Amino acid sequence: MNILLLGSGGREHALAWRIAQSAQCGQLFIAPGNPGMTELGTCLPEIKVNDFAAIEALVRREQIELLVVGPEDPLVNGIVDHFRAIGDFKELPIVGPDASGARLEGSKDFSKAFMQRHNIPTAAYRSFRVGQTDEAIAFLHTLRAPYVLKADGLAAGKGVIIAETLAEAESELREMLAGRFGAASACVVIEEFLSGIECSVFVTSDGKDYRILPVAKDYKRIGEGDTGLNTGGMGSVSPVVFADDTFMAKVEERVVSRTLAGLRAEGIDYRGFIFVGLMNVAGEPYVIEYNCRMGDPETESVMLRLSGDFVELLMRMATASLGDYQIQIDPRVATTVVLVSRGYPGSYEKGFEITLPELSNECLIFHAGTVITAEGKLVTNGGRVLTASCYGDNIEQALERCYALADEISFEGKTLRRDIGADLLELM
């Protein structure tokens, strides 16, 4: 089977790693891909994820039989709708929702209203648009600190602000409505702050049935102790100690089943991954957000814990035939530590040469922001550069291996958090 995977980050590298292991995978094409993926398939750096015409030509030329969409941008922009509008591609198996389903991530306002319509537990909120600054500030005055402000649209994982004081919240709100995140913050969702501990639940949907993948926890702040600016993610751990059978039964009943039923009720044929960002509030699950794809860097840990034929799972999702498919899970712990460029998530320099060590059987390196120069050198090319992802018999062992591997990776300005998983260890 010829498979095309769209994307270029650590998430896509992890997906490619798992796809390439399948006996059903003939040729794997990755667009645009990155240097770490070249040993897994054919990377096509000239094809960008939102160039639908070039992707269509590639699908036709290489006789692609399964299209897997990694990032959210092309889903929100309607890549599935593009192919469904072409006669001979109407039945092309695609992993990823159409634009109507991708609104779960593409619009925070839509997703919050969706949760309200279908009785899915979430924080109280109101949405405000440009020209409603005074009303938005008045609403802030009805809440207690801290204050949660979210850009309605896609903002590369950086559109959420948690302000500790009312003055800070008012200032951040004015900047957001004035265009801080461009069109993404033309509408701002203001939410009640929920106090608890977060986890990420990943659901595979074929439009009728669903399966729940291993639960993970990620770490968004740049600084240790969850301080500093939000990033795209600094590390992840799977499994999550507090996501036990009791908690997950509540998640499935109150969140997952209601979400899928809501999508069906609204005529959305959702075939793809649903990321559910959850807050555990005194043992009760509340939805923080939906994403219409796998999370990053959680995917780097979750893929390590999936066993069985991943391509079979993807095909069943794309062809509405999950039916009796059983998820197979590796019992080991998997952890991921992200190595980022100095200055990230603010401004940072690129082009620093990277030195990589030899790997043991328990560890992998996934590339997120790297490139090969004309001279053949591997150099940094993004904020999040690489991940160290390792197995262990327990969290301590997996993290010990991650940090040992991270210390062997060398590039100028290498930055990482050394407290990934520390909060979970305290709960054990």
Image (cartoon, grey):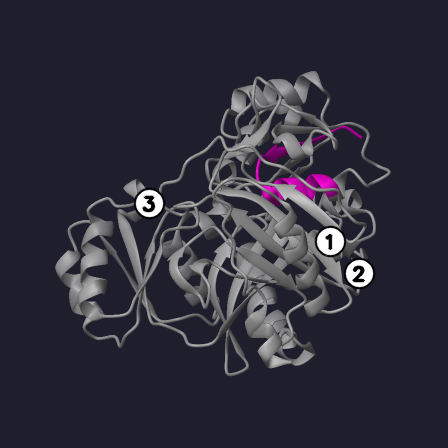
Amino acid type for the residue under numbered disc 2: Asp
Residue at mark 3:
184
Q: Residue furthest bottom?
A: 282
User: Could you say whether the residue bearing mark 2 is in a helix, strand or loop?
Assistant: loop
Task: For the C terminus, give its image quadrant.
Answer: bottom right
Dividing the picture into quadrants, the one containing residue 370 is top right
Residue at position x 23%, y 44% in the image? 179
- Residue farthest toward the right in the current orientation of the protein: 23
- The residue beneath circle 2 is 330
Q: Is residue 13 left or right of residue 78?
A: right
Residues tagged 2 and 1 counted as in contact (Cβ below 8 A) = yes
Front one among 23 and 100: 23
Q: Quadrant of residue 403?
A: bottom right
In this figure, which residue is indicated by the disc labeled 1?
304
Q: In the picture provided, is 229 more to the left or to the right than 380?
A: left
Magenta residue check for 413? no
Three-letter amino acid code at disc 3? Ala
Which residue lies at the image location 65% right of the left edge and 40% below the top edge?
Answer: 13
Name the amino acid, label 1. Leu
Mark 2 and mark 1: Cα distance apart in space: 8 Å
Closer to the camera in the image, 17 or 125: 17
